[in-house]
Image (cartoon, rainbow, N blue to C red):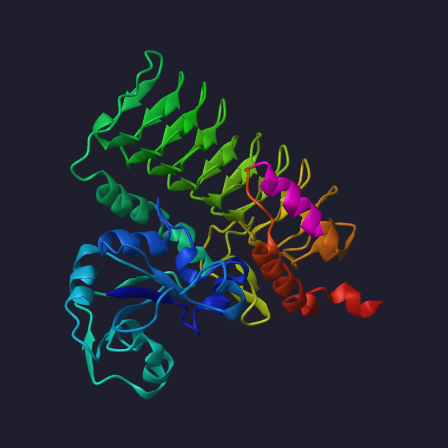
Amino acid sequence: MHVLLFDDPAIRPQLLPFTFTRPVAALRCGILTLAEKWQRRLDAPQIGYLTESYLQAKFPAGDTQGPALVINGAVCPDELLVRQVRGLESGEALFDGELLVAAHLHDATQVAELIQEGFRTTRQVLEPVTVIGQLWHLFLRNGAEIRRDFDLLTAGRESAPVGDAHTIVYGAENIFIEPGVKIRAAILNAENGPIYLGKNSQVHEGAIISGPLALGEGSHINPGAKMRGDNTVGPFCKVGGEVGNSIIMGYSNKGHDGYLGNSIIGEWCNLGADTNTSNLKNNYAPVKIWSHAAGRFVSTGQTFCGLMMGDHSKCGINTMFNTGTVVGVGANIFGAGFPRTFIPSFAWGGPAGFETFRLPKAGEVAERVMARRQLAYDETEQYIMRHVYEATAKDRVWEKAV
């Protein structure tokens, strides 16, 4: 049976700027993306995405003929929920209150009509589900999702040994090391949560790691880094300095000193040396951040909230981000002082003001950066970037003043 993960139209806009360049289910929370969680738990050979048309070439739906399980891409699965989804019969749907969680369709091509017109039979979940419905939910739920994914990925398997006499380990039973990992003179403390080190990753000299932590395939934790817990570093990243309760989705670098806290960094980003994020207001008031869906700043209700940076964005050395800053896709930030707390996609500048980072120039940078990882900035990637550039023109208010 096909497994299709759909973008809930009420949720996807809340997760911009990250969903400008990926479906909701392709977001990473814990060790795995939401799609990878479902694929593993359902033992599905492949999954498809029902997402925006401009993303479909990169994230295909696959074969939609015949019966399918159609699942809300914003929902994080657990064992109980997966049993309920597996137990759905043809024509039945599973809800959490008014939220559609999953449905078993006889004909997946009719998904749009069924969602609009209703299902033959509906059930309610046995327990409330975990939904990534707002940007800050990603870091708030990251520690719990690392624990879930750790149990899923390591069940019945044996970890590779630490293999370094100069590395200090606490809570060794909560550490799992995939093949090819290299560790040198580090401190691994998994007493408060698991530590997962992905295939061919490296932990360099003097790094201090507190769990929960997930380190993706081929990624590096640089010498002297301080990883303070509830952190995810996706595949092929380099991370240094001090990091707490943050997610770096993949192919991004924060290679140097500086603090990153309660933050989400997309793919193909780079934070210059000594970049720092504020994650707490001086008056301890709840943090407000820019909502692309509402077109205004909204309260997160959280005391701690740092930086949300979309794919392909960069910042120069010594950049200072104020509490609750949102940066769009393809932005380039530099200069002394604090930039504004909403930096639109394809902005070029900083505290002194912004101009537009024109798409051809932004594309040149993306092509160079992706080539460093032996990946192509191909027509599919270019089409997505062009769509985001055009869709976000209204946010670049300085263009209207010219």
- 369 magenta-colored: yes
Q: Position of residue 289 (x, y in %)?
A: 55, 60
Q: Position of residue 350 (x, y in %)?
A: 73, 49
Query: Which residue sits at x=26%, y=47%?
Result: 148
Query: Which residue sits at x=33%, y=66%?
Result: 4
View extreme (bottom): residue = 117
View extreme (top): residue = 165
Q: Residue 221: tell me if it is visible.
A: yes
The quadrant in which the N terminus is found is bottom left
Side of 198 relative to 20 (left or right) = left
Query: Which residue sits at x=63%, y=32%?
Result: 273
- 49 magenta-colored: no
Closer to us: 193 or 118? 118
Q: Position of residue 309 (x, y in %)?
A: 56, 51
Q: Residue 328: tell me if it is visible.
A: no
Closer to us: 107 or 75? 107
268 over 93 or under it: above or below:
above
Side of 286 relative to 331 (left or right) = left
Q: Which residues are magenta?
A: 362-372
3 over 325 or under it: above or below:
below
Closer to us: 266 or 229? 266
